[in-house]
Amino acid sequence: MIELEQRQFQSPGYYIRAASKRFEAEGAARLRHRVFVEEQGIFPTHDRDEIDLIATHLVALSTYAHEADQVVGTVRIHEESPGLWWGSRLAVDSDFRAVGRLGAELIRLAVCTANARDCARFLAHVQMQNVPLFRRLRWSPLEQVTIHGTPHMRMQADLAHYPPCTDPVAGWYHRPTRREARR
Ligand SMILES: CC(C)(COP(=O)(O)OP(=O)(O)OC[C@H]1O[C@@H](n2cnc3c(N)ncnc32)[C@H](O)[C@@H]1OP(=O)(O)O)[C@@H](O)C(=O)NCCC(=O)NCCS
């Protein structure tokens, strides 16, 4: 109960939107470093690459008195070739996982944003432990592959489940239900 109250105090809701401000981009970069370099050790020194230069970066922001506060989740999307979109570097701060469906909300904004930009296929290489999460979000497994020395599943989103989002910078405000916050 105390943990629930602390989490609800931490943030009653979250902005899910495309990063358009410097603190959002910097917060997303720091979060990715914490998760993919320090926590998972997938990259020894940094996780930046050339896709960062062309990608649209999406963030989940905690709020304080209804103002955006910290970047607590991120994902990026990019178009590899006409109609073929990829999502990558999905990360939620460890203190905010399974709190408010932030991973699911970021995936939703990612695919809905691409769907408004003439996306024909949306793919991601998903770490094996996260395959059940993506399956529940209407993604299908295609093929197992090894990336950065780690097994991943290439998965494809069911675009019919993700209506186009034409204004990702506005995004939306997500208020977790009590049931979500309780888990
Ligand atoms: C994967 C990750 C982004 C999920 O974020 P999250 O905010 O905790 O996930 P959500 O709360 O949105 O989860 C949505 C649902 O999937 C479930 N779920 C979350 N992670 C899961 C997993 N690994 N396996 C099975 N189910 C999972 C949640 O319990 C929730 O259940 P519900 O549908 O019954 O409500 C987060 O755990 C993370 O950052 N992990 C470390 C980095 C990482 O693995 N990145 C992904 C690379 S593919």
Image (cartoon, rainbow, N blue to C red):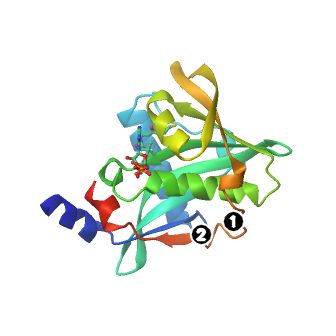
Would you name the residue on which mark 1 appears?
A: 165
Q: Quick check: 1 left or right of 171?
A: left
Residue 158 spot, x, y in % from top left: 68, 46
Q: Quick check: 171 left or right of 129?
A: right
Q: Earlier in the sequence, mark 1 or mark 2?
A: 1
Residue 36 spot, x, y in % from top left: 45, 36
How far is mark 1 from mark 2, CA to CA?
Answer: 8 Å
Q: Residue furthest bottom?
A: 65
Toward the viewer: 65 or 182? Answer: 182
Would you name the residue on which mark 2 appears?
A: 171
- Check disc 1 and report its element: helix, strand or loop: loop
For the N terminus, the quadrant is bottom left
Q: Ligand 1 closer than 8 Å to the CB at disc 2?
A: no
Q: Residue furthest right?
A: 82
Residue, x 42% and y 78% (percent of image)?
Answer: 67
- Check disc 2 and report its element: helix, strand or loop: loop
Residue 137 spot, x, y in % from top left: 55, 47
Q: Amino acid at mark 1?
A: Cys
Q: Quick check: 155 left or right of 94?
A: right
Toward the viewer: 95 or 101? Answer: 101
Above-or-below relation of 147 to 81: above
Q: Are marks 1 and 2 in contact (CB under 8 Å)?
A: yes
Q: Amino acid at mark 2?
A: Gly
